[in-house]
Amino acid sequence: MSELKRFGVSIEKELLKSFDRYIKNNDYGNRSEALRDLVRKALVEDRWLESRSSGAGAIILVYDHHQKELLEKIISIQHDLKEIIVSSLHVHIDHDNCLEVIIVRGKIEKIKRLESRLKSSKGVKHVSISKSTLTREF
Ligand code: NI
């Protein structure tokens, strides 16, 4: 861990009250730890705006496996972008639904392309992405 620096923050009373409630709800030991996490999260989001950067993450999708065309489409999309897929996990949730976790690493523009192609596939019920970076800065 690098050297810690202190800085003063001015904040509205009500906003601080809400922040303290957030700290309590999320089991943070103190304001500094909570603030560091929020800053890191914002920096990761910001980095993901730079499509040429590299990132890592996980895409979660839920779909009905009875739609054969959809199943083939999902497989074909993943083959098209196989260079950014590290691994994937398939779980049969219930009689109809499958859940897949796709671990990705590579150019952010390609990760976003994978996410949007999956999202726009008719019949996919849910797509979410967890974003991380490969940087050591934060
Ligand atoms: Ni399944």
Image (cartoon, rainbow, N blue to C red):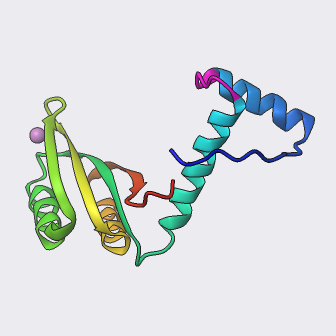
In this rendering, is residue 88 above or below 48? above
Where is ligand 1, by quadrant?
Answer: top left
Chief SS of the magenta region: loop
Q: Does residue 122 show up?
A: no
Tell me where residue 98 appears, x and y as whole percent. 18, 40
Question: Magenta stretch?
Answer: 25-30
In this rendering, is residue 26 above or below 86? above
Left or right, 129 with respect to 4, comes to left
Left or right, 11 with respect to 84, comes to right
Q: Residue at x 68, y 26 (%)?
A: 30
**Toward which corner of the image does residue 42 lie, by quadrant?**
bottom right
User: Is residue 108 or residue 35 the one in the foreground?
Assistant: 35
Q: Residue at x 41, y 54 (%)?
A: 132
Q: Residue at x 24, y 52 (%)?
A: 103
Q: Residue at x 89, y 45 (%)?
A: 10
Q: Does residue 61 show up?
A: yes
Tell me where residue 101 appears, x and y as whole percent. 23, 45
**Toward which corner of the image does residue 17 lie, by quadrant?**
top right
Tell me where residue 1 appears, x and y as whole percent. 50, 44
In this rendering, is residue 83 above or below 62? below
Residue pushed farthest bottom?
52
User: Is residue 93 or residue 15 the one in the foreground?
Assistant: 15
Tell me where residue 40 appears, x and y as whole percent. 56, 50
User: Is residue 122 or residue 89 the one in the foreground?
Assistant: 89
